Image (cartoon, rainbow, N blue to C red):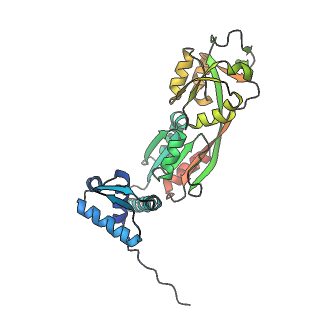
Amino acid sequence: MKKAMQTLPKITLKQLAVFVSIYQTGSTSRAGEELHLSQSAVSSALTELESRLQMPLFERVGRRLNQHPNAHPIYVQAQAILGQSLTLEHYHKHQAGQIHIGASTTIGNYVLPPLLAKLYKALPDASVNTYIANTQEVVAEVEQLNIDIALVEGMPRPTDMKAIEQREWRTDKLMIFAKRDSQWLVDIASYNDAGDCYELSIEQLARLPLLVREKGSGTRQIIDEQLLKHLPDADVIMAIQQSEAIKHMVSVDIGLGCLSQHVIEPELAAGTLVQVNVVGIDLSRTWWLVWHKARHQSPIWQTFIDILTSE
């Protein structure tokens, strides 16, 4: 049987790099500045790529370039190809490799730092970039292939389930908490000396002011699904983007908060904040590892995975 001949691709890395830059910047002139190419060279590379693909990638309206529906899936594949090419090109020069890690806010601020310390101990020359935002924003960056791997608190819920790998990583528990001797708990909550916590019923909690994270955060997702669904008339007085801000507002007795146990551990230990248990409410949750299936899994990527799975 005659062996099939391999054919060389006619699409070049330069064409893909030009397309990615135009996609990200929105113009050929800015892409030219970013890649140190003339505008005519950029336009020519884009035209050649569209010709090779036999499809338009942008719609030209005057001097503007609007993304064609074809552009996004090509962008995802181009990002993956360019990433693998850069890894190969710099393999010997940067043997430890590079990795871009995303993390939702609680994990990024309170859990990721010791994990990075372990990564640097295993690979002292590693080049690590981090992106910390709420779960929804981080997963969006994974989908755009801007992040190699992400650690998120809420259910990832990507727009393209087939393109994203998601794996359960850890369990965490959200805690409702208040300032010790809070005005809101006087004559309402009972105090459990053995557990060093206040105890409330769902009905009692519904009458108290709550400070919660913003929509899109993993913490808020669990609060909506496992707490607020039982409290249709709850007094949610503020939605806040930063866990530290919620913690400080609760510390001055503006209301009760609900955050990961990792966020309030020091204050619980110091006794300035106290846990509030609500009968019948379980705020346990799963943390997830998320990555794009098209992303190149470099040696440093595998080392980081080994560190995460050994936790």
Where does residue 47 sit, x and y in percent of width and height?
Answer: 32, 67
At horizontal 69% and vertical 32% (from top left) the residue drawn is 229
- Decide if residue 277 is on the left or right side of residue 122: right
At horizontal 53% and vertical 42% (from top left) the residue drawn is 136
Residue 239 in sight from this viewpoint: yes
Task: Work out which quarter of the rendered image holds the C terminus and state it.
Answer: top right
Viewer-closest of 90 and 109: 109
Task: Work out which quarter of the rendered image holds the N terminus and state it.
Answer: bottom right
Where does residue 266 sit, x and y in percent of width and height?
Answer: 58, 23
Quadrant of the rendered structure where residue 189 is? top right
Where does residue 117 sit, x and y in percent of width and height?
Answer: 50, 40
Viewer-closest of 183 and 286: 183
Q: Residue furthest front?
A: 62
- Decide if residue 262 is on the left or right side of residue 125: right
At horizontal 41% and vertical 74% (from top left) the residue drawn is 9
Residue 118 in sight from this viewpoint: no
Quadrant of the rendered structure where residue 208 is? top right
Count of numbered tags: 0
**In the displayed structure, would residue 50 be above or below residue 165?**
below
Q: Residue furthest bottom?
A: 1
Viewer-closest of 202 and 258: 202
**In the displayed structure, would residue 8 be above or below residue 165?**
below
Quadrant of the rendered structure where residue 177 is? top right
Where does residue 118 sit, x and y in percent of width and height?
Answer: 52, 42
